[in-house]
Amino acid sequence: MKYIIIMLFLVIPMCSYGFDKSFFDFDENLITVTKYEVLGKLPDPFLFDSGERVKSKEDWDKRREEIYKYAVELQYGTIPPPPEVLEYDLIYLSNSNEFHKNIQTRFYRITCGTKEKQLTFFMKLMIPLNTTRPNIVLDGDLCFQTINHSYYDPYFEKGIAYATFNRCELANDIGPERRKGPLYEIYQDYSFGAVGAWAWGFMRCTDVLEKLDMFDMSVLAYTGHSRGAKTAMLAGVLDERATIVNPNQSNCGSCSCYRINFEGIGEDDFKEPGETLKDLWNAVGFWVGEGMGKYVENEENLPFDCHYLKALVAPRVLLVGEAANDLWTNPIGSWQTSEAAKEVYDFLGYRDNLKWYFRRGYHSHTQEDSTILVNLIMNLKEGEELLPYYYKTPFKQPEKIWDWKKP
């Protein structure tokens, strides 16, 4: 009986999550690929612009600076510096929550910018009352009001706080005009698109979270969905205070692959192509850097691809979340660039810090996604056993589209 009790105790952390495990029950035939066009091999992240190759970790630090110019400054534009002015005020506090018990809700007004001109935006905090100095997750998706409240349950059940802000208060999310919004008025000499502006907001929220001195910042996660995933991904590259970077279904312009044109059929005979740079540029080109326009239908000549962006997070933890039926995200492209970026993680000695997974379903941020992130946070914080849902594809894996290896 003694041993039985111990065994039951050991599995409690995995069984305590109330998500639908059937979302992770699929095989490689869930998606039928109807088009798979490779526009070129993925460029070698270990190859200096000079033609020499990285030989040491010191070399990688120098090569990383070159990669940054392409994966960040070309893709998103140049990013404003930290503000000269950063102030915050608590403007709302409540210990009651319509959907979650024992959660304190706070709203802060954040004012930041230069000495000459500032902008104001708001950050919402949801803090478990029964936890002292909780870890915290941050997203910029306060403008999304359609998220199911069950999404937050895994965080609060494990005593993790959640912060979110409305990124559109920094830069407009209405096109096609570029550079609309208060951050552009303050930092006119920088070329950032909207995603860059929104990522800057992540960093300012983190500044405030540090100053509040209420949280355990040793495990801080950046997350977001769709365009918010693009934002979280870029913010995680820019800000090394993010312990975990968790883009959820980011589509083209972040975690997929510019060099793969994909179309497929998913569950319920759902048909859709993967998003291309042309699609992104024509619909919301103001999100990204102006230089990306010349690579529309010329992707094979891009000096980078999405594995470069993923590699810039290394050696910190990168968790890429995808949905099998979200074909618009180019699932095979995301898999290719994640696996390619693992070469960099492996070279630095942190191969296991790049994690990716697929679940069933469509384009949404669900309780299944938050459960995976919470479990990973608890693994880093307390050694909780990882859930067994990583590295399984809903499609037959094709050949990898690169022929280089780590040094």
Image (spheres, helix red, strand yellow):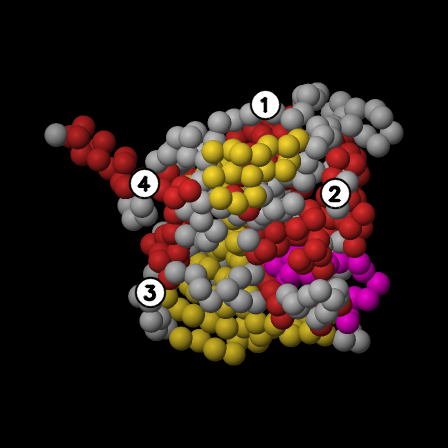
Q: Is mark 3 on a helix, strand or loop?
A: loop
- Residue 84 picture quarter: bottom right
The residue wearing badge 1 is 399
Cα distance between the residues tagged 1 and 3? 46 Å
Q: Are discs 4 and 2 less than 8 Å apart at CB? A: no
User: Which residue does the image show at 80% across and 58% down from the upper left?
Assistant: 191
Residue nearest the observer in this picture, 96 or 382: 96
Hey, what amino acid is under mark 3? His
Queried whether the magenta region covers residue 375, the answer comes back as no
Query: Magenta part mainly helix, strand or loop?
Result: helix
Residue range (magenta): 185-204
Hey, what amino acid is under mark 2? Glu
Q: Is residue 292 visible?
A: yes
Queried whether the magenta region covers residue 198, the answer comes back as yes
Hey, what amino acid is under mark 1? Glu
Decide which of tag 2 and tag 1 comes sooner along the chain.
2
Image quarter where the N terminus lies is top left
Residue 276 at x, y = what percent? 65, 45
Is residue 55 shown left or right of residue 353? right
The residue wearing badge 2 is 297
Cα distance between the residues tagged 3 and 4? 25 Å
Whether residue 307 is situated above or below residue 104 in the rendered picture:
above
Hey, what amino acid is under mark 4? Ser
Cα distance between the residues tagged 3 and 2? 48 Å
The residue wearing badge 4 is 22
Decide which of tag 4 and tag 1 comes sooner along the chain.
4
Cα distance between the residues tagged 4 and 1? 28 Å
Decide which of tag 1 and tag 3 comes sooner along the chain.
3
Image quarter where the C terminus lies is top right
